[in-house]
Image (tube, rainbow, N blue to C red):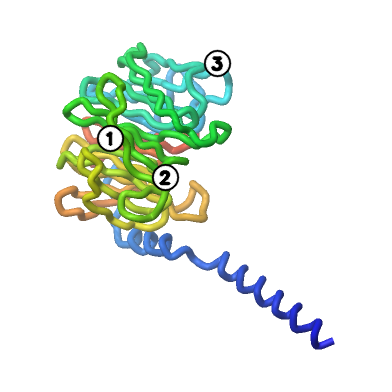
Amino acid sequence: MRGVIIPVLAAFLCSATAAIAANAPDPSTEKLRALIKTIPPLPAERVDIKVDPRVKLEGISSIAADKAGNIYVLHRPTTPDGDPVVVLDPAGKLIRSWGRGMYKTPHGIRIDAEGNVWTVDANTSDVYKFTAEGKKLLEIKVGGVPDPKREFCGATDVAFAPNGSIYIGDGYCNGRVLEYKADGTKVKEWGKRGTGPGEFNNVHGIALGPDGNLYVADRENGRLQWFDLNGKFLGERQFGGQFYNITFDAKGNMYAATHAKGVSLDEEFNLLKFDFKSGRILGKIEVRAHEVGVGADGTILPATRSERLVIYRQK
């Protein structure tokens, strides 16, 4: 009988140990939580935008603003008659929309220095360049999607260099950054899946910093990495949890979206503002921010991955 009890007891102890380990706090998330507690709220007024006339926004994935303050929303319509790109004036009045039938998983939207609108599809890895009126100017097919059947297996974000080069984050399956010429010709790529310097576990956001370097939000590794425009690794900063997205405002301040691992998107999502020169965190806003944009006047544009379109006007 004793010979039967010992294996059963051993199996019970192993399963109990596994259960405890599964419920143990994630060390990287605990690091992020400790940091968030030290950051004061950012003085900003929340404004809930109501679209007029009403447009059903679903799963808002990314938001950008042009120099006039018009808001460009990229969302994920669930019906075939929905346009993924919706353009509003600062008060929410509908100006135009486009993109019906062009996307499988709309993911990122950015506006370049000339006012052109760029979007990224996280399923097909197609990157489109439009005029502000929605006329398509360029299409870049990144390719190399390991599993096209997966909803998220492709590119995520796009950034622009002063020399006209375009940088695309191909984050979900490949873990790489690609450079293209202004005409869409591929120049090079770097990165792979991993945790080391210059490796990524989901390139979820990229942006050009005021110092001319490229900054990459390495989401599941919970860190920020930065590179020169040739792809040389220059440094990293570990935050823990999930480090979702990054952008810069006209004054060079840096904004980043962070989230704890293992909780819903409705919990522990924070948007942080940094003084870029010192690296000091100036404040936080508790809001879902799948991706984040900043208007020319400093208005913060978090994409909530929901139907809620909110902006924050800084005081």
Instruction: Please identify, in this view, whether the residue under mark 2 or under mark 3 is nearer the observer.
Output: 2
Q: Nearer the viewer, residue 57 or 231?
A: 231
Q: Amino acid at mark 3?
A: Asp
Q: Earlier in the sequence, mark 2 or mark 1?
A: 2
Residue at figure coordinates x 43%, y 40% from the top left: 174
Q: Nearer the viewer, residue 306 or 189?
A: 189
Q: Nearer the viewer, residue 278 or 191?
A: 191
Using residue 16 as the reference point, say whether residue 271 is left or right of it: left
Decide: is 291 above or below 73. Answer: below
Q: Amino acid at mark 1?
A: Val
Using residue 214 as the reference point, say whether residue 53 is left or right of it: right
Residue at figure coordinates x 35%, y 49% from the top left: 199
What is the spatial separation of the Cα atoms under label 1 and label 3, in whole angstroms? 29 Å
Residue at figure coordinates x 61%, y 73% from the top left: 17
What is the spatial separation of the Cα atoms under label 2 and label 3, in whole angstroms? 31 Å
Q: Which type of secondary structure does the marked residue at label 2 adopt?
A: loop
Residue 123: horizontal and vertical position, in percent?
49, 31
Quarter of the image for the N terminus: give it. bottom right
Q: Which residue is mark 3?
A: 81
Q: Which residue is mark 2?
A: 202
Can the viewer see residue 286?
no
Residue 188: horizontal and vertical position, in percent?
29, 34
Q: Earlier in the sequence, mark 2 or mark 3?
A: 3
Q: Which type of secondary structure does the marked residue at label 1 adopt?
A: strand
Decide: is 93 above or below 235. Answer: above
Residue at figure coordinates x 36%, y 31% from the top left: 63
Q: Earlier in the sequence, mark 1 or mark 3?
A: 3
Q: Which mark is residue 18?
A: none
Instruction: Please identify, in this view, whether the residue under mark 2 or under mark 1 is nearer the observer.
Output: 2
Q: Which residue is mark 1?
A: 294
Asked where in the image residue 304 lies, by quadrant, the reply is top left
Asked where in the image residue 249 lies, by quadrant, the reply is top left
